[in-house]
Image: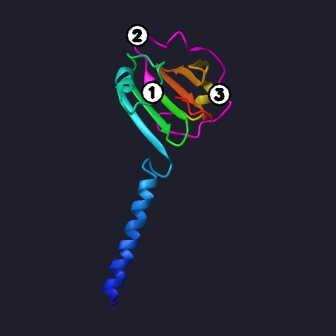
């Protein structure tokens, strides 16, 4: 086999290996997915939605970072007229630090949460925005 044939086989092998790696990690090496919706209602209607049911339909500028290999989430939205649902009760900040990050997520925000929504979302209102953090859990609930 000549050098051109060997080189072609070598490149084909590399291309096949890269295709395999890409197929195994559709969300990138971090296994993180970013989603954004104009309203809470649109986010909950999305067939690939990950938004929790407690987010008000009139919430706007909803953005979320999702750990695709687990249940950890960070989320931010602008509240509408309905504000936070009554089901979001006073509660303690999460003891588990966030491992997800985004340029819109203030460092350590999960330690400033003062409400709990849907038993596992830690929430805080801060400067007119709602921030929410869901730590990793074993049962993978949304």
Mark drawn on residue 81: 2
Please name the residue that numbered disc 3 is placed on.
94
Q: Give whichever of discs 1 and 3 has the lower sequence position.
A: 1
Distance from label 1 to label 3 (Cα)?
19 Å
Front-most of residues 137 and 93 = 137
Q: Mark 3 Cα within 10 Å, few/some/many (few <14, many 20+)?
A: many
Distance from label 1 to label 2 (Cα)?
19 Å
Task: Report the magenta residues as a range.
Answer: 76-105
* Residue 4 location (% of width, % of height): 31, 85
Please name the residue that numbered disc 1 is placed on.
51
Which label lies toward us, 1 or 3?
1
Farthest-out residue, bottom: 2
Tell me if residue 10 comes above or below residue 111 in the rendering: below
The secondary structure type at the circle numbered 2 is loop
Distance from label 2 to label 3 (Cα)?
27 Å
Indicate yes or no whether the magenta region holds residue 98: yes
């Amino acid at each position: 086999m000549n050098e051109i044939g060997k080189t072609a086989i070598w490149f084909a092998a590399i291309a096949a290996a890269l295709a395999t790696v890409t197929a195994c990690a559709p969300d990138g090496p971090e296994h993180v997915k970013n989603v954004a919706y104009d309203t809470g209602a649109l986010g909950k209607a999305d067939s690939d939605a990950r938004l929790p049911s407690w987010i008000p339909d009139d919430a706007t500028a909803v953005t979320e970072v999702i750990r695709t290999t687990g249940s950890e989430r960070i989320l931010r939205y602008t509240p509408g007229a309905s504000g936070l649902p009554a089901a979001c009760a006073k509660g303690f900040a999460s003891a588990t630090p966030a491992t997800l990050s985004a340029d819109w997520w203030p460092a350590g925000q999960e330690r400033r949460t003062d409400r709990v929504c849907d038993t596992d979302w830690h929430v805080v209102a801060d400067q007119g925005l709602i921030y929410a953090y869901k730590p990793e859990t074993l049962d993978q609930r949304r």
